[in-house]
């Protein structure tokens, strides 16, 4: 129900019955950093009256007893990719509301790479009217780097400008091609210009960027960031006026660094919180924005201030004037925490409606739009030969280049000597190597790329997945071409997802039929599949935090320092292709 | 010159020559509240690079030596009426730039009351391209109270909505009819609705509003305020999420209260600074936004924080993302203070151009648009009889109502007994009384209103002025109808302004031919006229801060508790007219 303003004002001044009173709690005031006793009167979907000090004796037919609870505004996540949680927006909403997140600003750039504007439009349709308010930033780097890979789509400045006019769109999403922006490469500079012309927020992504290059990135108009690697980097960015988003997720933890950075400066208002990417099992186990807030509080940030970062400041960043605070006139997104320090949500209201009670979802959330399930895995005719290492006429020892991955998933080029016979390697691969390939799956006509990978630690079998950042072709790694081919077939048959095979047997699978990235199932179902997959993966030696994603970032052509795309092995810094054979 | 973004980025990263370096100063970082050595590189109209710690060795053909100086962003005034300074926007710009104000958000509601939309449009035209960046909030209460007065125009919701689409318009200006909003009177509620529909800022005006009525005003969607009368009022408003603007001007001082309020709360980000109304002589003598900042700093607000309130926070309030900070990519509005504590500007840059040097204006500022001089004083045929107290058949002692004004300009109804003979008062008025009238000057056909006034302290003669808030008819007060008529004639002959007459002689005049509110002359000329007027006024007993405005607010139908409009004497609380004769 949408509140008519007149009735809301009448309820606020006391001439109309309130719908709901939240009574007896302590309120975190995100404007003043105070924590004070206050009752809150709700009318329709908005807050009508905040009774600091409990002087008004508010009454309503519905009451929530907040004794012993702390009231905080619904939390605002300033940057996430729903696809990382492998579920559609409604399932995502069901999963994160119990943790107290009521608003997310999503960057649908995974599905954008697969389905183009139709993918972004689907994410908008699929999030329309959810109790989890969903705003969209338009994916800016589709594909991540123009020219070294092919994705399912390509967004130029005109496409970005068009999407910026869509409803609930609040910015241009993380401009990952920061070298291109600093250098003012034409394609990406035009996209930034489209954002500036629209007067919208330009979201950044600039790990390790510092000094004059950081100044240049800011001068270009991009003024937020969530990729800082340590606290001095954050301090430099804060001082230059860049918004720094703390981030705590499955893969990266920066909240402790943020707490440390904040001790360096008397005050910083350009701070917000995001989660970016969370694995489904990890989400259920460790929470959402609350996770980073626990770290901030543990590291000495006053609790009220930490809450402000995850609420009001996100609203300020995006100009969401109706959100981010418990104040008269704002939308009644309110979280009752049973522990402020632990940031543990008991009751969650979205638009005045109780959506979470005793920590559990209390409402039905339907799919507002049918998920596009079907033909997102479009690969040409293929057999195991595509993955066989071969070079016509090669005999004896040959030097080959190898992508070597360390435990931080940083990659470098190394070399290896392999014995060849009749154009093919003699005998099995050395224990420390696997074959790695990216199979075009967006209907491109070309053959898969191929490389050698060191450091995956896969002892046998093969892993394949359509979660292959950011172009999301089909990436596969394995000990033998035959097992790789089998894994690819399983993934294709599932219409997308991940498969783990060994010795001719399917050990585990995760079904992601929506664009090969998401499932319409509940997050619990997907999480169970992922956990089972990860357990089997660990048995085969995969060491990643989430083995199902062990190879997913190896196709990310902006991550240091060597990656493989559907077009070949790429030296990230030079953006040049690298030949497999040294000679 | 407008910077092309590409060249700016090149200059930022060091691949293109900067235009200007500001070297050797201490920079107030409004993001972090730090004060640190920093050089600033400017390219075109924007800041390219901020070199905190001076590591880059910035060079440029132009340099400003900032040794011993403190660099702060150009200041942003969140709410002013240019008309109060009695000059047109270009003259106003010339006057305030030397104090370090580089951006103003104006509310042209005085000229709006006189000229309607054409007046608002003139203020936009007259401020286009000035080095003083001028944004407009659309006057919301024209007239102040619908129904008890007639102005030169009437803005309904449709007119407001239309003006909200104009360029440089950033909000709906102070919604003074707060009782009407709390009660949701149709006319003003529709105007608020127009603002909400446009997604723009809704500026408030709510002195002494508290408790549930304050909640109701906020629930209506209005969320800023600059009229708080003391610090507890400010604290209540800050806690409810209302923006509180500190204000220090000719008539009101609230900066000390603001400093006191800020000691009550751990933190408040919803604070900005404004001047609202400044008399021309007072502006030259005591400054602009710097005046309030001096008070804040003297009262214990850390200087960097005080600067933040007058810069970044104003930009945040209105979403002016290019302004409010010295940071890469922002417009190069920079002030070099020779004293931070005294907030004394030495050099001011607007858009990278030096506009003030050694405290003096260093550029020519032309009138971007001709001022509408002429026919704004349109009064019907009139003679002294219009101001004569008369009642057909009145004989002997009669009880009459009197508007009694105290030293805070608060008015109350009192009564007096006057002897009548032949329908007219017998003998001169008692010493403590004067006649008071509002003469329609917008071409209305009706006759002037008439009342008795106590407390003005005018010993002889008459004062008349077209500055008569807010409908700006012609208000006149005097000891005799004849002197009142003379004063009215002088004002009409000048095409607007103020006149002081006594004994048939013109003692002083202030010429305000632009809408009867402003002069196109330099502020020094107007200030001299005002000072001369005020000196003569004090000789005649007028005690106001600025005697030229001694009667200007007596027509303000929203000020407590009794006022006179062109339609009669109004009881402000009930908005009912009051008869002059008790019986």
Image (spheres, coloured by chain):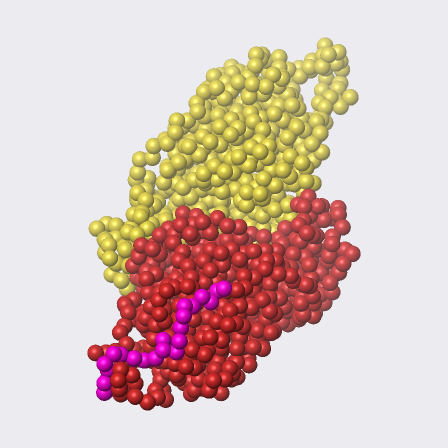
Chain colours: A yellow, B red
| Magenta residues (range) | B375-398
Q: What residue is rendered at 43% in x and 87% in y?
A: B460
Q: What residue is rendered at 42% in x and 29% in y?
A: A526
Across and down, in percent, residue B394 comes to 24, 82
Q: For the C terminus of chain A, which image quadrant?
A: top right
Which is more toward the observer, A575 or A461?
A575
Left or right: where does residue A20 sit relative to residue B503? left
Q: Quick check: is B118 in the magenta stretch?
A: no
Which is more toward the observer, B240 or B331?
B331
Which is more toward the observer, A509 or A181?
A181
Which is more toward the observer, B184 or A205?
B184
In the figure, residue A194 lies in which quadrant? Answer: top right
Across and down, in percent, residue B73 comes to 61, 61
Q: For the N terminus of chain A, which image quadrant?
A: top left
Across and down, in percent, residue A476 comes to 57, 22
What is the count of numbered marks? Answer: 0
Asked if residue A226 can be seen in this view, the reply is: no
The correct choice, above or below, for A225 with respect to B271 in the image is above
Asked if residue B258 can be seen in this view, the reply is: yes
* Main secondary structure type of the part rendered in magenta: loop
Across and down, in percent, residue B360 comes to 67, 70
Q: Quick check: is B382 in the magenta stretch?
A: yes
Q: What residue is rendered at 52% in x and 64% in y?
A: B374
Left or right: where does residue B3 sit relative to residue B421? right
The correct choice, above or below, for B2 with respect to B270 in the image is above
In the figure, residue A129 lies in which quadrant? Answer: top left
Residue farthest top in this picture: A422
Left or right: where does residue B189 sit relative to residue B126? left
């Amino acid at each position: 129900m949408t509140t008519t303003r007149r009735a809301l004002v009448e309820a606020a001044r006391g001439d109309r019955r309130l719908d709901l009173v939240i009574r007896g709690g302590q309120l975190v005031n995100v404007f003043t950093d105070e924590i004070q006793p206050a009752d809150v009167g709700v009318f329709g979907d908005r807050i009508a009256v905040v009774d600091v000090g409990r002087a008004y004796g508010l009454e309503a037919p519905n009451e929530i007893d907040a004794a012993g609870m702390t009231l905080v505004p619904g939390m605002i996540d300033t940057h996430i990719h729903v696809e990382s949680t492998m579920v559609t927006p409604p399932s995502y909403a069901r999963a994160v509301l119990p943790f107290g997140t009521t608003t997310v600003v999503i960057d649908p750039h995974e599905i954008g790479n697969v389905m183009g504007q139709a993918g972004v439009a689907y994410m908008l349709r699929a999030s329309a009217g959810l109790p989890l308010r969903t705003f969209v930033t338009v994916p800016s780097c589709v594909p991540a780097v123009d020219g070294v890979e092919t994705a399912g789509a390509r967004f130029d400045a005109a496409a970005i400008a068009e999407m910026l006019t869509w409803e609930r769109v609040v910015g241009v999403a993380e401009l990952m091609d920061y070298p291109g922006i600093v250098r003012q490469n034409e394609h990406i500079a035009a996209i930034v210009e489209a954002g500036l012309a629209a007067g919208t927020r330009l979201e950044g992504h600039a790990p390790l960027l510092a000094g004059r290059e950081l100044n240049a990135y800011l001068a270009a108009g991009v003024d937020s960031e969530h990729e800082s690697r340590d606290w001095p980097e954050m301090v430099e960015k804060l001082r230059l006026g860049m918004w720094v988003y703390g981030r705590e997720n499955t893969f990266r933890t920066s909240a402790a660094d943020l707490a440390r950075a904040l001790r360096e400066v008397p005050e910083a208002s350009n701070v917000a919180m995001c989660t970016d990417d969370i694995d489904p099992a990890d989400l259920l186990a460790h929470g959402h924005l609350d996770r980073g807030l626990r770290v901030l509080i543990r590291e000495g940030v006053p609790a009220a201030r930490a809450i402000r970062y995850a609420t009001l400041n996100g609203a300020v960043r995006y100009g969401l004037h109706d959100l981010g605070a418990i104040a008269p006139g704002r939308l009644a997104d309110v979280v009752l925490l049973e522990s402020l320090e632990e940031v543990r949500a008991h009751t969650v209201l979205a638009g005045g409606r109780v959506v979470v009670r005793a920590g559990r979802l209390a409402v039905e959330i339907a799919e507002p739009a049918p998920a596009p399930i079907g033909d997102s895995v479009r690969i040409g005719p293929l057999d195991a030969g595509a993955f066989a290492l071969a070079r016509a006429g090669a005999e004896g020892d040959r030097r080959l280049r190898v992508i070597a991955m360390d435990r931080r998933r940083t990659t470098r080029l190394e070399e290896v000597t392999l014995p060849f016979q009749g154009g093919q390697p003699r005998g099995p691969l050395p224990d420390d190597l696997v074959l790695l390939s990216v199979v075009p799956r967006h209907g491109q006509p070309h053959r898969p790329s191929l490389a050698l990978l060191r450091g995956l630690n896969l002892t046998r079998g093969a892993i394949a997945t359509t979660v292959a950042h950011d172009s999301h072709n089909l990436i596969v790694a394995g000990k033998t071409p035959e097992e790789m081919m089998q894994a690819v077939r399983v993934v294709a048959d599932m219409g997308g997802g991940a498969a783990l095979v060994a010795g001719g047997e399917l050990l585990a699978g995760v079904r992601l039929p929506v664009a090969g990235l998401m499932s319409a199932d509940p997050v619990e179902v997907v999480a169970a599949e992922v956990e089972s997959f990860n357990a089997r993966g660990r048995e085969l030696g995969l060491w990643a935090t989430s083995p199902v994603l062990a190879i997913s970032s190896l196709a990310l052509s902006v991550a240091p320092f060597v990656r493989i795309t559907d077009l070949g092995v790429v030296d990230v810094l030079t953006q040049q292709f690298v030949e497999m054979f040294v000679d």
